[in-house]
Image: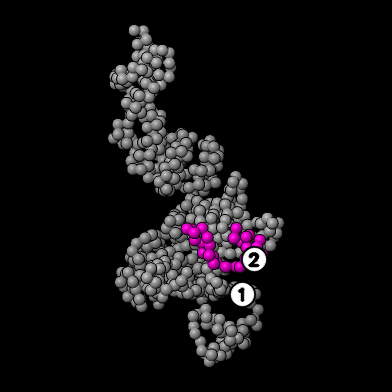
Amino acid sequence: MDYEIVIGLEIHVELSTKSKMFCGCTTEFGGDINTHCCPVCTSMPGTLPVMNKKAVEYAAKAGLAMNCSIANYSKMDRKNYFYPDLPKAYQISQFDLPICKRGYVDIETEGISKRIGITRIHMEEDAGKLLHDQWGKGTLVDYNRCGVPLIEIVSEPDMRSPQEAKDFAEKVRSILQYVGVSDCKMQEGSLRADVNLSVRPTGSSVLGTRTEMKNLNSFRSILRAAESEAKRQIDLIESGGIVVQETRRWDDDAGKSYSMRSKEEAHDYRYFPEPDLVPIELSDSIIEEYKKSLPEMPWDRFRRYTEELGIPGYDASLITVSVKTADFFDRAVESGADPKTASNWIMGDLMKLMKEIDTEEIPFDGSGLSELIALIEKGIISNNIGKTVFEEMFRTGKAAGDIVREKGLEIVSDESALEEIVEKVIDENPKSVADFLAGKEKAVGFIMGQVMKETKGKANPQMINGIIRKKLEALKNM
Amino acid sequence: MKISKETVLYVADLARLNLSDEESERLSDEMGRILGYMEKLNSLDTSNVKAMEHVEPVSNILREDIVEESFDRDLILSNAPDEQDGAFRVPRVVE
């Protein structure tokens, strides 16, 4: 039988506020255990939370960027459960009146675009981190992360393949980075996804029983976990079994998921309105203001790049994936680089280096690239040397001009200096000279290569070509 | 209104409470009477009444996003029943 996979995602994203959601402790990543804590975020009795204004603004902006309607009136609720990562024994979250509802994100999978519905986006606080000590005597808790503002983005079950799920998560991340409400650093856990997945016979309109895999912190693990879970469910059904609704833990190293509870305890969070926090009211005018302040989004930039700057669609789509490469490109063009030339450098050298070093940070802005391009266009350095300079810029953050000066990379266009080198090469390679005199044109290429080697690629190629020919012709007539 | 003993035990379980037989009997009766009292509200037509999410008629009590100094760790841990290497230590939690 053929099966259809149905996937919905819940994506948790840490907002990039400077302070926590309900207290003034820093949200900075890292730091010694329990040094970013105060009585509020460690839940001392008698303390009261006060909502961070920026967190509300960021959540609303995230919603607007994902085409949600923003609630004029929303409130915080208590989600009750016992787990030592939350010292209050409840998490402040939103239940029935989330800040954003009913939006969508357009994704493209294998060239086909598709609209994925956003059910809701709500605000909540992050929990602390449990450190399991190896001696097994107890569990250690670090509350540095406790109280960091999060948004949870809940999608409709609109995805039909693991690849679509991955593409959706990547698109959400890209959008949030554009809006600037989250850095979405996966390695710091600031974006985590839960995958809800079920399968059903193709053509059926009834949803199958779903399972949930929690806390996937890389796109690769979202893809792999979804692939593995779809296969597990299909195999189970094919062999006459029944899928049980449960939470499963994905083990990325083993490439397998495990049932987290043998006896599924029904979740009963007993939500109720948080009495310590008053409701949040956002007027239409403030929502409009937020909307106007949204930066140019990837799809807008794509249009501008292709229609106004004449960049091919393929290039534009890759450059706009990350706000960092898009900003870099814009800055390069602003500071005078030809759009297509800048795009070629970004698509080629820049992306290759980013991938090689496995980083998303570019240590200089686009004006650095436009300076480099100008050096090449003015004939000060060769294109090949340009590539070396670019790599050096990327690794050291130094300016192109400084690197060229420090390393003496300017093209040698001094005729007498070049003549000297050519003469030396001709003297050292009598065989090539003989070949040339015997009519072998190829010999010129070889001599040219040797001259380039002598000058470490810095010789002006037109000039040396001319000089070599002049010298060789002279030998011919001797 | 009658609250069954099963419901009492279920709620007690959610609240991590161990109740004796006698306690759960008594609570079954007491909770029943409390809910019975609240039951009166159901006799009123509230279809046109807006839900009251908060007692005070105020909204938007917000703070600016400004980092303040956190507490000294020793002070933060001073109320902890158990600690180790700067962390709170709790009974082992199995994932």
Name which residue lies at 53% across and 73% down.
A269
Asked whether A376 or A38 is in front, the reply is A376
In the rendered view of the protein, which quadrant contains the N terminus of chain A? bottom right
Is label 1 or label 2 in front?
2
Query: Where residue B49 is drawn, which disc sits there?
Result: 1
x and y percentages locating residue A166 in the rendered image: 54, 53
Q: Is residue A31 magenta?
A: no
Residue shown at 49% from the left, 83% from the top: B17
Location of residue B79 with respect to A36 vertically, above or below:
below
Of the pair A256 and A174, the residue shown nearer to us: A256
The amino acid sitting under disc 1 is Val
Q: How many angstroms separate mark 1 from mark 2 (CA)?
A: 49 Å
Q: Secondary structure at mark 1?
A: loop
- Residue at position x 36%, y 17% in the image: A431
Q: Nearer the viewer, residue A441 or A146?
A: A441
Q: Quadrant location of residue A394?
A: top left
Quadrant of the frame with the C terminus of chain A: top left
- Check the image and name the residue furthest to the top: A478
- The region drawn magenta spans A231-259
> Looking at the rendering, which quadrant does residue A183 occupy?
bottom left
> Which chain hosts label 1?
B
Tell me the residue that label 2 is attached to: A241
Q: Is residue B43 left or right of residue A266?
A: right
The residue at 59%/60% (across/down) is A232
Give the percent coordinates (x, y) of residue A123: 50, 64
Q: Crowdedness of circle 2 by 10 Å Cα count: few (<14), some, many (20+)?
A: few
Q: Chain of mark 2?
A: A
Q: Where residue A313 is drawn, which disc sits there?
A: none
User: Does residue A395 sit above or below A65 in this rendering?
Assistant: above
